[in-house]
Each structure stands twice: as structure tokens, then as C-alpha cells.
Image (cartoon, rainbow, N blue to C red):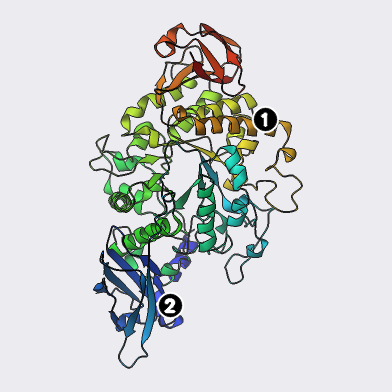
Amino acid sequence: MKLKFTLGLLCLFLQFQAFAQIPALERVEPSFWWVGMNNPKLQLVVHGNGIASREVKLNYAGVTLSQVHKVENPNYLFLDLLISAEARPGKFNIEFQGKNQKKLSYTYELKDRDKSSNRIMGVTNKDFMYLIMPDRFANGDKRNDVIKGMQETALNRDSMYYRHGGDLQGIINHLDYLEDLGVTALWLNPVLENDQPKTSYHGYANTENYKIDPRFGDNALYKKLVDESHARGIKVIKDLVHNHFGSQHWILKDMPSKDWVHNWPEFTKSSFKDQVLFDPYASEADKKIMTDGWFDGHMPDLNQKNEFVKNYLTQSHIWWIEYAGLDGFRLDTYAYNDPEFMAEWAKFIKAEYPRFTFFAETWVHGIPNQAFFTQGNTINRGFDTELPGVTDFQTLWGINETLNGKFGWNEGVNKLYTTIASDFMYQDATRNVVFLDNHDLSRFYSVIGEDFDDFKSGIAWLLTTRGIPQLYYGTEILMKNFSNPDGLVREDFKGGWSGDKENKFTAQGRTPKENEAFNFVRTLANYRKNNEVLQTGKLMQYVPENGIYVYFRYNADKTVMIVMNTNDTISDLSLKRFNERLDGFNSALNVITSQKINSLLTINIPAKTTLVLELQK
């Protein structure tokens, strides 16, 4: 590992000896912007051989060049522009003039904003989110499977480490499948260019900030995916990585300054110990290792106290919202970022897009640990993180214990009950994302020992509890495996490639059990989609007794009763205890089977079954 790090440092820090290897004007980022933004400030990154030796001029009504920043590396200029409210869409030249040098010019464009009403809607507890790893979902365009000139050109579906060829067109081709399933929001693992020499398929080591990986498509196709999704009532969430870049990122090959990343005398990996962030007795050295240590040898840790780094990240994120009309962000590896920067970043996003939402990955163990990162300073953090919601790992541990553990004072379903009972720690727990598995975790069906009854109970809980439910691709057709290594839970969705012997996108291609699973998810997801009571309704839960957990979702129009029997035996449950919520109701409809229950005195619950009952008068 130390050798790998040393080679990486040579690549990163010998850039100042390589000035002549780039054109005189290599790039300007962002390459265009918009008029009428809430924040009138824009900082352009200009990269070119010796560009800092030149003077910069521009002349366009409503645009002022307020400051030109020079940094350590003479191949960079950072231009501060002020775009007034009076500026109009159009093009203008930015001139770079040097002594005895040929004049350089870049034509910059300010575009008009797209004011369509169905853009930038935000993702809320009204949605049902579907997570896709694009390389493993469907291949819609074989022409982009291998791109000449990129560092990884291996294409091998039999390997969990190489690319398989899934792309954006493949997702577009199956939007009808997702709409039918009841999906209302689509979260894709990162799709920015990831020109790393190996395992580039997952996307979490981006090498560009403004460019879709050509093996997935291009920027225009990504925007088309968003538009096509919106036309079906499906929102789109972009996965962001603030914490690190891939080591082959263009800006790391010729860094503006040595402090663009966190430097260590020898390779230092993050401890990943979130406890040091809130431990009142923690050492500063431990805190530094946690936040400034590298995620991996090929993922340099960004210095988010550097003002230029902060601007570069924030503006690229705003650019994607405006360009593509995105609805939300998922923030990767949130706990390892600089907390002050992340709060500042969140304020910028909220100010520009009040309806836009985002949630963060907080892979921690402990309810206070998780609530610590959420907005509102609710547990005495000392400042407001401005983070609306998180990926709710605590309820994940709770449902896993519910289905795998034995009922006890703190065990079995009591762990889930206690977790939900601790929602007082959050400003609003309904903004948290609840899930059964994802691209980093063992698949749910395997975790529960491929028990089909437990599978249905888990799905029933996911789609009826509070928060924003998220389903990992293939869970609805019982895809399975353990994340040892991660690639085993990132297998192809069968039928996504031409020539596949099975097509799980169709009922004909699924087994009877897979169809039963798919139909169970679809029935409940579409019921949730059409009934606000399971989206925004209040929640009331009762202390579990004898392995049975009962809770209600209710509003002024409807009440839904959820009864989870975690026992291996049939149970007869007297409902007298629940009169507080049953008052006025005398029957119920089973949401899954459409069967009528004519009496609410006692109900029979099959072993390992969760009933979802719409109460009726």
C-alpha cells in the first residue's frame, strides 16, 4: 500500500514539472452558466500552459470581472465574475493576452434558465426510491461499451471487477418497468467520468466534474434520462462524492496548489471512526485522521478548507441541478468531510433551490451517532449541519434484528421499535431514507436466509414505516448474495443485455416465486403512491408484545393498521388494546390480497407475516 501511495504522490506532486504537456488554453470550467441565478457570483477555473502570465479581459453588459486569482501553479487562473440581474443570455469572449504571445480567446455563454414546472422538485417521503448501479442494470448501447483512450478498456460480464456495459440508455429503455413497479424517484450510483485504471464501474472515484462517463453516454443523454423520467412522474437523484476525487482526476494530475488535497508524510487512511467527531474526550490527532485521512490509496482526500476547492465542488453541483433539472442529491461518505464546509455547501444549495432536497450516507452504529449529522443542532453538536436527512442505517439494523433475532426485552422486533421510538433526536425523521440493502451491503434476501415470508414482511415494513423508502435494484425479483466482496451484490439484472437467456424485466422471464415477490412490491408500492396516508400520514406505534408489533399510519382521510407477527406460529390477536386508533372503524381491507376483514375484535395472523390493513367504517 505504501508503494502505491508513493507512486500516487509522484503522479500528483510532480505536476509542476510538466507545464508544456498541456495546451495554452486547455479548459474553462464551468464551460457555461446561466443568467438569473440567485447567487450572482461565479468562479471560473482556467487551465492552460503558463496561463497565469496573461492578462484577462472581457466586455459584456451585466458581467464584471471582479478579481483574477493566481495560485502556486502558473497553469491556472481563477476568475471571479459578477453576473448582475440585468445580464441577458448570450455569448462573449474572454481574452487572455500575454507579452509577445499569441492572443487566446474563449467564447463563454450565459444561458437562459429552464423554468419548467416539473423540474427540481425535491425528493420527499411521498416518494419511493429505486437505486441502480448503471453498469450492472441494462446495456442499451453497445457502441459505448469500450472507449478507446480510456485507461480501463476491459469488458467482462463474468468478472465482478471489470465493467459490464450497462449504461444510461439501458435505464431509459426500462423506465416503463420502474413506473409499473411504483417507483417515483431514481437514484443512480455516480455516473461522472471515472477514468481510473481499474474497478472504474462503480463511479465513486470521479476524474471529471462536468462530464458523464462516455461508457454510460454523454451529458445530453443524462439530461434526456431526467426528462424521460420526469415525463413518467419519476424524479432523479444524483450521487455526489465531496470527500475525494479519483487519483486520475484531471485537476490532480496538475494541481493548482499542493494543498488541494490532504498531504501526509506517509500514506494515512481514514480511521472511519465516527465516534471521534462527537467524543468530548477525543484527541485532535484522532479527529484529523478521521476527516483528513484518505478513503483509499487511489482516492486522495480533498482539502475542503481551500476556498478554490470549495467553490469548484459547489459550483459543479449547482451546474448539474440547473443543466439536467435534477430533484435531489445523495451525499457519499458524508462523515469524512469537513463539517463546516458541508454546512456552508448545504446553505448554498438551499438558497439557490428551495425545493431541492438531499440526504447523506451515514454508515454508523448508534442512533445518537446518526442523529449527530442531521440538521437542527438537536443533540448539542454546537452548530447546524443543514443536512435534512440521512440513510437510516439504524432502522436497517432494526429490521434485520426483527427478522433474524429472537423476541426479547431489547431483541427481535423490540430493537426496531426502540429505534423508531428514538426519532425525537431528529428535527424530522421522515426525511431519513429507509432501506433493506444497497450497493455496499449484503442483499436483503440473503441476510434473512432466503425466507420468503420474512422477505414480504421486510417489504411491508419498508413501504409503510416513516421516511423515504429505497429499494436496491433486483430486490423485487429476489436477487441475492453477500457482499464478500462488494461485487457479489452488484450482479447484472438478467434481461438487461441482448442475448440474455432470461429476462427478469418480464413476467414470462421470472419464476413463479420471483413474480410473487415482484407483484407484492408493485401492489404495495402503488398503493403507497396513491394513498398519502402512507407517505405523509402520522405514525403511532405500540410496544411489541409476544413477538407482535403493531403500528398505524393515519391522517384525516384514512387509517392503515400494520400488524407484524415475527413468530414462527400463527397468532390470534385481540385488538382491544388498540382502541385509541380503531375507534369508529369496524372492518378492514387487506391491501395486498383485497380480502375483507369484517370484525376488528380479534384477527388471525399467520406465522412470520405482516398484514397491511386499510381500516373502514
Identify which residue is drawn at 54% across, 8% down.
599
User: Looking at the image, which is closer to me, 323 or 288?
Assistant: 323
For marks 1 and 2, the one nearer the N-term is 2
Q: Judge from the rendering whether residue 384 lies leftward or rightward of residue 153; answer left or right.
A: left
Residue annotated with mark 1: 516
Q: Amino acid at mark 1?
A: Glu
Identify which residue is drawn at 57% across, 52% down.
134
Is 596 drawn above or below residue 374 in the view shown? above
Identify which residue is drawn at 41% across, 68% down.
251
Residue 278, x across and y down, in percent:
29, 39
- Disc 1 and disc 2 in contact, CB within 8 angstroms: no
User: Looking at the image, which is closer to me, 474 or 262?
Assistant: 474
> Nearer the observer, disc 1 or disc 2?
1
User: Looking at the image, which is closer to me, 303 or 181?
Assistant: 181
Task: Classify mark 2: helix, strand or loop.
Answer: loop
Residue 248, x across and y down, in percent:
48, 66
Q: Is residue 439 visible?
A: no
Residue annotated with mark 2: 26
Residue 268, x across and y down, in percent:
40, 55
Distance, label 1 to label 2, CA atoms, is 55 Å
Residue 36, x across and y down, in percent:
31, 61
How many labels sit on residues? Answer: 2
Q: Amino acid at mark 2?
A: Glu
Q: Is residue 526 visible?
A: yes
Is 190 drawn above or below residue 579 in the view shown? below
Task: Classify mark 1: helix, strand or loop.
Answer: helix
Is 138 drawn above or below residue 264 in the view shown? above
Is 129 drawn above or below residue 552 in the view shown? below
Q: Judge from the rendering whether residue 449 lies leftward or rightward of residue 90; answer left or right.
A: right
